[in-house]
Image (spheres, coloured by chain):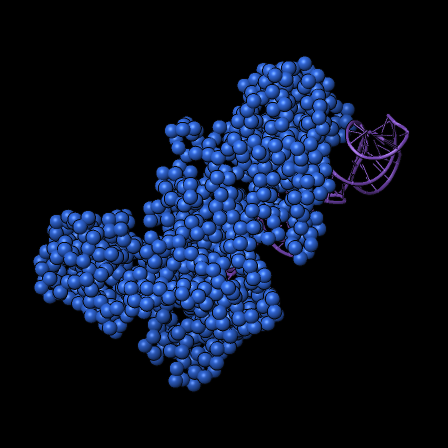
Amino acid sequence: MNKYAPNEIEPKWQKYWEDNKLFEVTEDPSVKTQGREKFYGLIEFPYPSGAGLHVGHPRPFTAMDVICRKKRMEGKNVLFPIGFDAFGLPTENFAIKTGRQPAEVTAENISNFTRQLKMLGYSFAWDRVVDTTDPKYYKWTQWIFLQLFKHGLAYKKAMPINWCPSCKIGLANEEVVDGKCERCGTVAEKRNKEQWMLAITKYADKLLQGLENVDYIPQAKIQQQNWIGRSEGINFKHRVKDMNLEFEVYDSIPQTFLAQTFVIIAPEHPYVYEMVRGTEHEKKVMEFVEKIKKKKAGDKFDIDSDMEGIFTGRYSENYLGIGRDLPIWVASFALMDYGTGIVGCSVHDERDYKFAKMYNLPLHPVLFPKNKELAEKVRGTEIFYREPDGVLEEPIDFKGRKWNEVRQDVIEYIVNNNLGKRAVNYKLRDWVFSRQRYWGEPIPLVYCENCKNKKYHYVLVHGYYDPTNFAWLMWAKNELEKQGHTVDALDLPNYKTPNVNEQVDFLLDKVKIDENIVLVGHSMGGAVVMKLLEKINKKVAKVVFVDCFIRPEFVDRPRPDVEKSCDWKFDFKKLKKLSDEFIILADSSYGVINKGQDREMADLFNGKLIIANPIETHFRAKEEPEVLKQLENNGWISLPESELPLELPKVEKYEPTDTGESPLAHITDWINVACPACGSPARRETDTMPNWAGSSWYFLAYTMMKEKNGEYVWDRKKMDYWNPVNWYNGGMEHTVLHLLYSRFWNQFLYDIGVVPTSEPYKKRTSHGMILAADGEKMSKSRGNVINPDEMVEKFGTDAFRTYIMFMGPFDQAVAWDTNGVVGVRRFLEKVWTLQERVIASGAKQSQGIATSADANRLPRNDKLTTLLHQTIKKVTEDIEAMRFNTAISQLMILVNEMSKLEVLSLKSYGLCLQLLSPFAPHLCEEIWNKLGNKESISKSEWPKYDPELAKSDTFTLAIQINGKLRDTLELPADILEEEVIKQALELEKIKKWLEDKEPKKIIYIKGKLLSIVI
RNA sequence: GCCCAGGUGGUGAAACUGGUAGACACAAGGGACUUAAAAUCCCUCGGCAGCAAUGUCAUGCGGGUUCGAUUCCCGCCUUGGGCACCA
């Protein structure tokens, strides 16, 4: 027998796998995959840093490799891909320092990572490798962004960024240490900059609901839910005394509404100035506002310890009609972007309480009024009542009633009595998508002044029973006219008993239709717009449908007049060609038009679907800003899809410009382009996308068809076969943001019909970090990084992999211990040495080895057979549950037992190798081959255990007296309870402990324990 | 501060669903083989008391539920992850 030489056998088998394309897979059901279930295992693709792979990476990679190797042996068609998430700060900062091209550095890093990953023997489908910085890849990242833009989910907003006045560069949060620039130590400032935002908040509910049907580890689900932070509360209406000003106050704990004694408003709120303008309070209040704004802009602002406020001099008049006026304060801890930016305060909130104490504001510890109606409804009301102005010091006794029951009752009461209306709020904020950096995907948009200033003629068409002065039409007309457009918003004839054709003729008579027209229909007005278009058959600039329908089906009540108003037959093929832009605006509450018609219309027109939260159901309010937003043109024009990818141009300097724009702003040839819409001079967007972008859809890229030239083709058939991902493992540090962002993109892509499922990942698990030997995080600066190259060189890949799986529970952080690798290497040596005993058994090497079917033919009543079957069971179950450490310890127990035997059957040894092969694939391939098998062990069938053979025929009974272990007893497995008790009570030790006392109670846990109480 | 997850021998840890706490390894000590070393094999290995049998304490700390708690409940201490421009 040769010595175990991993450095010889490992490269040999890696080459064999690669040459034979063993882990490349096809999704063509007609070829190899017939009748086989697919399995898509995914790991978070690495960021190819210059430092190379460190031992933290292999933990999740090895885990998923073990799972995938096992699934393959179980007969699944397994896709296990790999790629590189290569855009981002570290490479860019390296480029700035060294003056090298980021693309060049990235290519080097990727090639080093590839070498290391191959060295570790992973069964990756290397033919599908992706690189987010490859223009062929980011073509689709840009394409997805354009879809988001076209569907109204990308918008610009002024947001503060960190800015170093000395380096003249925008800083990432990470680069600001103690409020100072990481590189030069200058105090960082905040600067306001227009940024592209993605409206992830519009998906808040979907992202929440989607969690119900996925199998994520509980922490991940909870973290996602908490991050989205949905709360259902009440918006209370307030009126400012002596002013014509009303506002709404959002309260997520409306149970306490009557205890409110003051109102606070966020310093940034525009109403603050309104309220104090021209009063004696103006100067002081506005100074305070400025001070807080500055404080908040700094890094150190702490919402709780920096609490302060100032009285505005204003009162909320006759609060909720109960005859009390509440003082209105501006306070540092009121947040503009949560709720309405105005908070009603009571003693029941810790912050409010602290604030009230600080400024000596009155407190009413009243939960409910002595209101007869409510008292009857909420049984036991009096127990919640306290005298006004008495400060509540002790907790409230709810006498068994649950907070939530009380809450629902109170909410109902408030709504029924018109004191406020239901409102939902989320903690989730929109996603800041712009980066003023070089090394990211360019945002494929162009800003065109000419398009922005272009004037249109708007035709606003109202619906059934909606005189124009009731809905938003007159308001929108006014707003659009202010912007210099011309508008027709006419009252249609006979709108109470409408005839669509009559209305169309009426409009044709009054309005000249040409390419400069924007048609806007509200509700039934949509039908008028469609019939009008059909009749004139001329192209218009834009068509907007505001909660329209193509069939008169209603959610709330039937409308026979509407049903009769036209034939409800439209030529969508023809209509579709009559404008380049169709916008379908739907009411998210679906209070009038049923869900589904919006999607259908968007499909029929190939239009942009926007699901909005109108101020009133069905957009009945006088002012609907979302409608106006869709009508306005902000000058941002998307590149035609055919011009993608928009490639990153090469630049000389990677530093941003002094103005805070990205380095791309230096390149005038690149920036100045002809507007794709009108041809006049326009400017490209110079911001790039964040690192999150490329990683928000990479799991789809793996399943896209990649052509010989590396071009990706969005092939639905292939995507439908592989998606969703069956099992996604990643770090806990990614369970909030990355997971949420990629779920958002996937849900959006599902909504526009280009991916098969709304949720991208069926199952999500997480691994713990590998720490350095000193228990600290591994980092270059600490100098405690362990390099896998060195480990593989010393101990071999198999020992390295097996140790990583053995070192501790997979989901917890563990410190690296090189000594531990020694122990595992010893174990593998033992496995290798066992070959001798197989040969000694007389088995011929040529005869081949056991398959799982043969396992049942192992001798019965043999201790090793029982252990072998127990091991098959345990290893199979443990891998599935990611309990790799105990799977390996079980294999160690098996191998220790085998080592004690003089002769080992070929069958037993073969089974042992199969079970070990996912962890130590090279070693097992080598021995498997030496034993005479022609095919790779990965092609063999995963062993199955026989439950009968896995059972032992005896067990050890533990005997407790008063909960303490006093003796044990070896008994046959099938013994009856009476016999157990009889035998136990006869034991000398037990007799001694009982001292002739009669047991009060005897509890028998079958096959385990007997508990005697005296 | 807020959200999430941990805390068991000298070390990494194990313990199914509330049922013998410390499996499997590492380190350490002792022994066998060897001229010697490496490798391998055997033994010991949570604390305290005891020659031993055995007893007793012990799963971050304090309480509770239970015949029985590392496991469930309440309070506290502590370590790690995330907190929106690191990825």
**Image position of A134 (left or right of A578):** right
Q: Residue at x 66, y 40 (%)?
A: A792
Look at the image and tell me whether residue A915 can be seen.
yes
Q: Is residue A375 above or below residue A817?
A: below
x and y, in percent, of residue A746 in the image: 40, 48
Q: What x and y, as percent, mark residue A287? A: 48, 81
Quadrant of the frame with the C terminus of chain A: top right
Q: Residue at x 12, y 55 (%)?
A: A535
**Residue A861 in sight here:** no
In this view, the residue in front, A336 or A79, is: A79
Give above or below for B3 relative to B29: below
Task: Please give left or right for residue A402 compared with residue A778 in the image.
Answer: left
Question: Which chain comes out purple in the rendered image?
Answer: B
The percent coordinates of residue A563 (x first, y second) are: 14, 50
Compare residues A442 and B43 and report the one nearer the observer.
Answer: A442
In the displayed structure, does residue A320 sit left or right of residue A784?
A: left
Q: Nearer the viewer, residue A288 or A348?
A: A288
The x and y percentages for residue A650 are 47, 60
How many marks do you count on the picture? Answer: 0
Q: What's the residue at 58%, 68% (across, down)?
A: A181
Q: Quadrant of the N terminus of chain A?
A: top right
**Which chain, by letter, is blue?**
A
Front residue of A864/A286: it is: A864
Q: Residue A280 falls in which quadrant of the image? A: bottom left
Measuring 48% from the left and 54% from the top, which residue is drawn there? A692
